[in-house]
Image: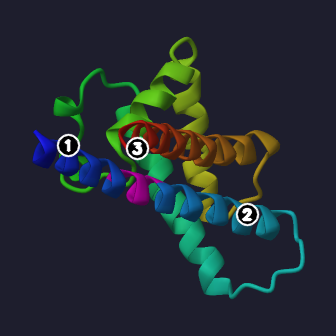
Amino acid sequence: MKCHIMSDLGLLSHKYQTMAELARRLRRNVLLIKRFYYNIHLPEKEQDISKSRIEFQEIVEFLADVIPLREEDIWPTKWLDDPPLPNDLVEQLKKIHGLDKSQYVKRLRNLEERLQNIEPMKERDIFLLEEIAYAASVDANTVFRKLMRWA
């Protein structure tokens, strides 16, 4: 029994580390993108901003593809092996946008296009990016609370 608890604790610890790293990376990417689009002095390299934009472009494309679908089993093949976000996070965003799913997907597609073409963003685009990063932080905090209950 004790060995089983330790393996569960190890799995939770690993999941927390993974989720916390994802949340940190997404928050940093949002910050870089906001600085770029608001023309705020950038100490970061142009390639860092480009990498952030490309990573979010992939995430936004992924969400636009899978949010309308009911189950992970019917996701497009390109997302099955290595999705850019964990399924828990996708499910959380689905719940948040349960009533406006089609409008949310449309806004994601518009954001994807702006990110791809390096077009000026709108406030709602920034809000979408922040919402994704916030949802990742919430997921990491949820896993952390579970981890602390086990510890």
- Mark 3–mark 1 Cα distance, whole angstroms, equals 11 Å
Figure check: 55 above or below 61: below
* Amino acid type of the residue that numbered disc 2 sits on in the rendered structure: Leu
Image position of 131 (left or right of 36): left
- Crowding around mark 1 (Cα neighbors within 10 Å: few <14, some 14 to 19, many 20+) is few
- Mark 2–mark 1 Cα distance, whole angstroms, equals 39 Å
Magenta stretch: helix, strand or loop mostly: helix
Q: Which residue is mark 3?
A: 147
151 and 97: which is toward the camera: 151
- Residue 112: in sight, yes or no? yes
Earlier in the chain: of badge 3 and badge 2, it is 2
Percent position (x, y) of residue 111? Answer: 61, 47
- In the picture as drawn, the residue positioned furthest to the front comes out as 2
Image position of 114 (left or right of 121): left
Figure check: 100 above or below 44: above
Percent position (x, y) of residue 127? Answer: 73, 41
Stretch in magenta: 15-19
Q: Which residue is mark 2?
A: 31
Of the 4 image quadrants, the one containing the C terminus is top left
